[in-house]
Amino acid sequence: MENLFEDKVVLITGGTGFLGRSITKKLLNTGVRSIRLFSRDEVKHHKTQEIFNNRKIRNLVGDVRDYVRLLKATKGVDIVIHAAALKRIDMIEYNVEEAIQTNIIGSLNVVRACLENSVKKVVFISTDKACSPVNTYGACKFVSERIFSESNYNKGNAETVFTVVRYGNVLESTGSVIPFFTNKIKKGDKIPLTHPDMTRFIISSDQAVDLIFNAVKYGRGGEIFVPKLPSMKISDLIEVLMERLEKKCEVEVSGIRPGEKIHELMINEAEVPRTYSFNGLFVINPAIINPWIDKDENDALKMDRLTPLEMQEYSSKDSVVSKEELKEIMKETLKDSGPYLE
């Protein structure tokens, strides 16, 4: 995988966020020529400089809403990882226009800039909330997935490959439930639980980065790469965190917030017939043109077809681990978080 980035210039939009820093950390262990971190937050740029202090990193202040700035940032770039987005579901529900400007128009700007500058491969970071969306954030990501998929078929002679990865919230990331619950428990506050049956997929930052790197390596254009993941009950997570912190707090059922689901979907019923299993991942093929079928039998990317009988959908309610299993997963996931756990 390291050879994939040998002497390459990589641009990460939203590069100073948790995921961007996680990608940067791993890229620095490859032969990458330079890493351009594109973000509108100059404070996070400064923080990232303090964390890495590496001459391969270029800090570019800019907003994905600004096409001219993106055009300059993508010049001479080989690979783009588009992670920039407005992500707070509760805030976005009351700021729909702003979400559209960043999450949809921003994605269009990334596509246009990458085509103009002949970027070789572009990976869009989506979310499980884009699958059968019920909130503005998910709807924006759903549209952006379609933008990236469709852009492979209206690009003329351009060789740029656009692909997508879809997964849930990274456990230890900014805005995830772990830092939120941890702070509440440390203070001895009541812990709000939106619904006692709520489940979510479990993914670590390492798994998320590996998924992105696999998309860079194997993406042919228009597909969505989805990891095979376990899931957890949020009520179990709260109990595990209280045990880790050796504190007991009252849990209060607060009710589902606007735009929130009890269970998350990663692959819906309509996508299953065009989904394949490959290399420990699921690959959802685009509905327009399918680049993964009718290949030679000796093709290294040959996959086994999933049928509707084997899987009706891929939901967080169907792969819930026990509380003991969750303890082990969290122990492994959080042990090396260090400064990346915010």
Image: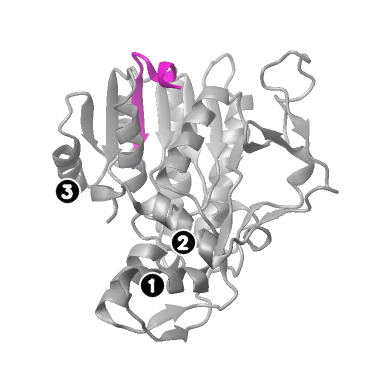
Residue 104 lies left or right of residue 278; in this view the side is: left
Query: Relative to the observer, which residue lies in front, 278 or 76?
Result: 278
Dot placed on the residue nearer the N-terminal end, 2 or 3: 3
Give x and y (percent) for residue 68.
32, 31
Please say if the residues under marks 1 and 2 sit with CB atoms less than 8 Å apart.
yes
Give x and y (percent) for residue 285.
69, 34
Residue type at tag 1: Glu
Q: Is residue 206 magenta?
A: no
Q: Is residue 11 magenta?
A: yes
Q: Is residue 158 above or below residue 256?
A: above
Reading the image, the residue beneath label 2 is 327
| Label 1 environment density (alpha carbons within 10 Å; few <14, some 14–19, many ≥20) | few
Query: Relative to the observer, which residue lies in front, 89 or 27?
Result: 27
Residue 145 lies left or right of residue 82; in this view the side is: right
Reading the image, the residue beneath label 3 is 43
Please say if the residues under marks 2 and 3 sit with CB atoms less than 8 Å apart.
no
| Label 3 environment density (alpha carbons within 10 Å; few <14, some 14–19, many ≥20) | few
Location of residue 78 by image quarter = top left
Q: Secondary structure at mark 3?
A: helix
| Label 2 environment density (alpha carbons within 10 Å; few <14, some 14–19, many ≥20) | some
Marks 1 and 2 sit apart, C-alpha to C-alpha, by 10 Å
Residue type at tag 3: Val
Please say if the residues under marks 1 and 3 sit with CB atoms less than 8 Å apart.
no
Q: Which residues are magenta?
A: 1-14
Reading the image, the residue beneath label 1 is 243
Marks 2 and 3 sit apart, C-alpha to C-alpha, by 35 Å
Give x and y (percent) for residue 8.
36, 17
Q: Is residue 324 above or below residue 116?
A: below
